[in-house]
């Protein structure tokens, strides 16, 4: 029986969550259907892994397009395939998918399922990674939001970015806002408006606040609870992650 005929045997309104219980013509078709779905799940996991290295969020629409091309997966099955692929990624690689609402639709970021004790080393080249870690720490210790000029001053004083390195600033903003480690937004209107940096959605998922606080404590020879507000946030984050 041809592949085209097998696909027509699937109910057109079938929900993706019930992929394994599709109503099929015969045992042979059912076997083929299960095999096709398994292949789609593996291909979905492979595609997500291949995109993960860039740290750029993956559009659900891109996954659907790839599955349609590579596995002829119909649109109504995409959500179910992604869900199964996430289980495979967690079991084999220890990753989880986090769904985010973007301007152009649903996005996914790939993070470790279990909280690690530092920022993953493949976040970027080492120089940018050091700048990111320093910036996230500074923002965290400053109450969660830092004015643009204040962050450039901090990075300059720390010897991580030259005072007038405007190309470096542009690259920093472009890289880490696109990867969702940082949020860069305008506050206010007119001449009184200013830009602020905050933690992005990936940073909240991936960067352990207690790790940053412990590093601060070591540097200043204090205990982490010396900074009461930050310690409270870090403890609450750990509790939420464990639940």
Image: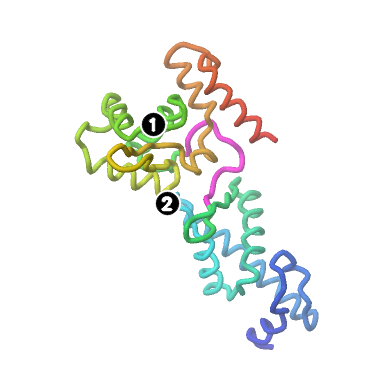
Q: Which residue is mark 1?
A: 146
- Residue 141: horizontal and vertical position, in percent? 45, 24
Note whether 230 is above or below 152 in the view shown: above
Identity of the residue drawn at 52% across and 13% down: 226
Q: Whole-Å distance between the Cαs marked 1 and 2?
A: 26 Å
The extreme left residue here reads: 164
- Asked if the magenta segment contains residue 118, the reply would be yes
- Residue 51: horizontal and vertical position, in percent? 47, 56
- Residue 101: horizontal and vertical position, in percent? 54, 54
Q: Which residue is mark 2?
A: 54
The picture quadrant where one finds residue 237 is top right
Q: Report helix, strand or loop for mark 2.
A: loop
Q: Say which quadrant the C terminus sits in.
A: top right
Number of numbered discs visible in the structure rendering: 2
Identity of the residue drawn at 61% across and 43% down: 113
Which residues, given as a range, are shown in magenta? Answer: 109-120
Mark linked to residue 167: none
15 sits left or right of 158 in the view:
right
The earlier-in-sequence mark between 1 and 2 is 2
């Amino acid at each position: 029986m041809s592949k085209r005929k097998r696909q027509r045997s699937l109910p057109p309104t079938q929900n993706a969550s019930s992929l394994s219980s599709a109503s099929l013509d015969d045992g042979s078709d059912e076997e083929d259907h299960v095999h096709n779905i398994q292949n789609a799940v593996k291909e979905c996991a492979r595609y997500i892994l291949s995109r993960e290295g860039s740290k750029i969020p993956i559009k659900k629409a891109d996954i659907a397009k790839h599955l349609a091309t590579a596995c002829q997966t119909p649109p109504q099955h995409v959500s179910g395939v992604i869900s199964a692929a996430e289980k495979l990624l967690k079991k084999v690689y220890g990753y989880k998918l986090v769904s985010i609402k973007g301007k152009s639709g649903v996005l996914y970021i790939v993070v470790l399922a279990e909280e690690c004790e530092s920022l993953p080393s493949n976040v970027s080249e080492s120089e940018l990674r050091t700048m990111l870690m320093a910036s996230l720490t500074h923002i965290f210790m400053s109450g969660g939001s830092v004015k643009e000029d204040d962050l450039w001053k901090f990075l300059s004083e720390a010897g991580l970015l030259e005072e007038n390195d405007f190309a470096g600033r542009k690259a920093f903003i472009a890289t880490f806002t696109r990867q969702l480690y940082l949020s860069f937004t305008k506050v206010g209107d007119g001449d009184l408006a200013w830009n602020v940096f905050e933690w992005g959605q990936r940073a909240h998922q991936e960067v352990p606040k207690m790790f940053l606080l412990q590093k601060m404590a070591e540097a200043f020879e204090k205990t982490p609870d010396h900074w009461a507000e930050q310690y409270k946030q870090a403890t609450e984050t750990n509790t939420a992650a464990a639940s």
